[in-house]
Image (spheres, grey):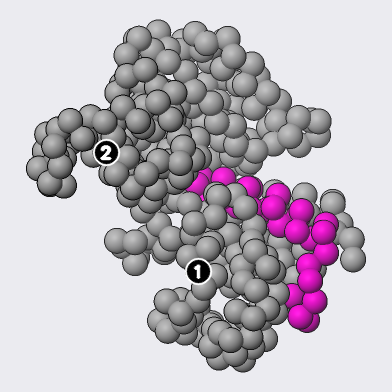
């Protein structure tokens, strides 16, 4: 069973069309499912605070499945926490989700999956801030996925995550570039829209502010960064807008520094552009110190990377949230010397010379790995 690469590429392009036209998510996921030679697809992105902002698409699935699963079986499912704790961008399947013994003993399998004829279900979290976002597929029979099907799913996952990011940004701003620019300015984020020829078609106030800081320069000739490495990334991202180019398309994430803070930069291709204006590149410039602080799950993953103890994890969470170390001591009932020892051990494990270096490392980790 070999995946048709041309059909897969066409399905991936459909994801980006859906990103800017919400009505196309259903047919886009149908094309993706068929390209994988899968039976069904289960894709959703739920806003954890506003149910009116949910995105939900299924392909060849009973609509009652999602309701039954979330209402009854999610809390019983051993796979659920494993998917949420898995590295972002990894498709889990088979033994990575549960053993044969766990599957056969699970009411989720017997009462939820089998009645809906869902076999060999895969799962992957899409890790959007303040949302629960998921992509999974199933087969027609209880036979393992072929290697090329899993490789294709891994590719689709990355493109779906990027398309979803574009969709959420544009949906929140009602796909209007001026409103989008104002929205991102309010968040402290600069956005610059560049067409395939390199011409700037839109820039918001925060992008103008970054120009004043000499992080970048905008002119009739296009966009130029102070950082030469960023200019090379920009050139590659613009080349990737042309589908005939040999340059791989997809999101590019990088970082640059000013004298006192870090700026994350995302290059997001928008096939078809906004409002039918042709393919564009959205350049998002995100001053990391102006973004919301890391949540407990992000701190937990950071701690796992450097093998921090629970006490060291708590002190990182405290300083990352802006809490004074003495207040952290009061809340935990420990001495200031003990807290300083935890902080010192943490900096040693993370190879940081100062508390400021540690905070910048946490910012970079969240930006690159989780956001």
- Disc number for residue 8: none
Q: Is residue 10 left or right of residue 364?
A: right
**In this view, the mark in front (2 or 1):** 2
The residue lying toward the viewer, choosing from 18 and 318, is 318
Percent across and percent down for residue 203 are 42, 24
Percent across and percent down for residue 324 are 15, 33
Residue lying at 60% horizontally and 36% vertically, measured from the top left: 251
The residue beneath circle 2 is 315
Question: Is residue 144 positioned above or below 360 on the image?
Answer: below
In the rendered image, which quarter is residue 240 located in? Answer: top right
Q: Is residue 203 left or right of residue 337?
A: right
Q: Is residue 8 left or right of residue 15?
A: right
Residue lying at 40% horizontally and 22% vertically, measured from the top left: 352
The residue beneath circle 1 is 80
Q: Which element type, helix, strand or loop, lies under badge 1? A: helix
Spatial separation of the CA atoms under disc 2 and disc 1:
28 Å
Q: Range of the magenta residues?
A: 139-168
Residue lying at 82% horizontally and 59% vertically, measured from the top left: 147
Q: Is residue 106 visible?
A: yes
């Amino acid at each position: 069973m070999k995946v048709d690469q041309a059909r897969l590429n066409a399905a991936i392009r459909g994801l980006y069309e859906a990103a800017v036209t919400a009505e196309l998510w259903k047919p886009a996921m149908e094309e993706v499912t068929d390209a994988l030679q899968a039976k069904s697809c289960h894709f959703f992105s739920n806003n954890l605070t506003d149910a009116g902002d949910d995105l939900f698409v299924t392909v060849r699935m009973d609509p009652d499945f999602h309701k039954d699963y979330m209402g009854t079986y999610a809390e019983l499912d051993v796979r659920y926490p494993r998917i949420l704790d898995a590295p972002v961008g990894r498709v889990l399947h088979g033994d990575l989700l549960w053993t044969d013994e766990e599957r056969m003993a699970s009411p989720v399998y017997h009462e939820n999956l089998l009645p809906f004829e869902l076999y060999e279900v895969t799962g992957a979290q899409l890790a959007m801030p303040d949302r629960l976002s998921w992509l999974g597929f199933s087969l027609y029979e209880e036979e393992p996925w072929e290697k090329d099907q899993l490789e294709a799913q891994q590719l689709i996952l990355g493109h779906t995550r990027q398309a979803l990011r574009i969709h959420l940004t544009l949906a929140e701003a009602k796909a209007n570039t001026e409103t989008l620019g104002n929205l991102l300015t309010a968040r402290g984020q600069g956005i610059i829209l560049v067409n395939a020829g390199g011409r700037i078609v839109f820039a918001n106030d925060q992008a103008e502010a970054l120009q004043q800081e000499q992080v970048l320069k905008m002119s009739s000739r296009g966009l130029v960064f102070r950082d030469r490495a960023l200019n090379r990334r920009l050139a590659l991202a613009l080349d990737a807008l042309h589908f005939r180019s040999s340059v791989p398309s997809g999101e590019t994430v990088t970082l640059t520094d000013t004298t006192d803070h870090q700026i994350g930069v995302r290059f997001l291709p928008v096939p078809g552009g906004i409002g039918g204006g042709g393919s564009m590149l959205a350049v998002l410039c995100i001053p990391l110190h102006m973004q919301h602080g890391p949540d407990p799950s992000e701190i937990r993953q950071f701690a796992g990377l450097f093998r921090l103890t629970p006490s060291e994890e708590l002190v990182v969470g405290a300083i990352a949230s802006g809490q004074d170390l003495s207040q952290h001591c009061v809340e935990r009932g420990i001495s200031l010397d003990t807290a300083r020892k935890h902080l010192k051990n943490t900096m040693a494990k993370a190879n940081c010379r100062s508390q400021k270096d540690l905070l910048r490392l946490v910012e970079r980790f969240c930006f690159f790995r989780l956001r």
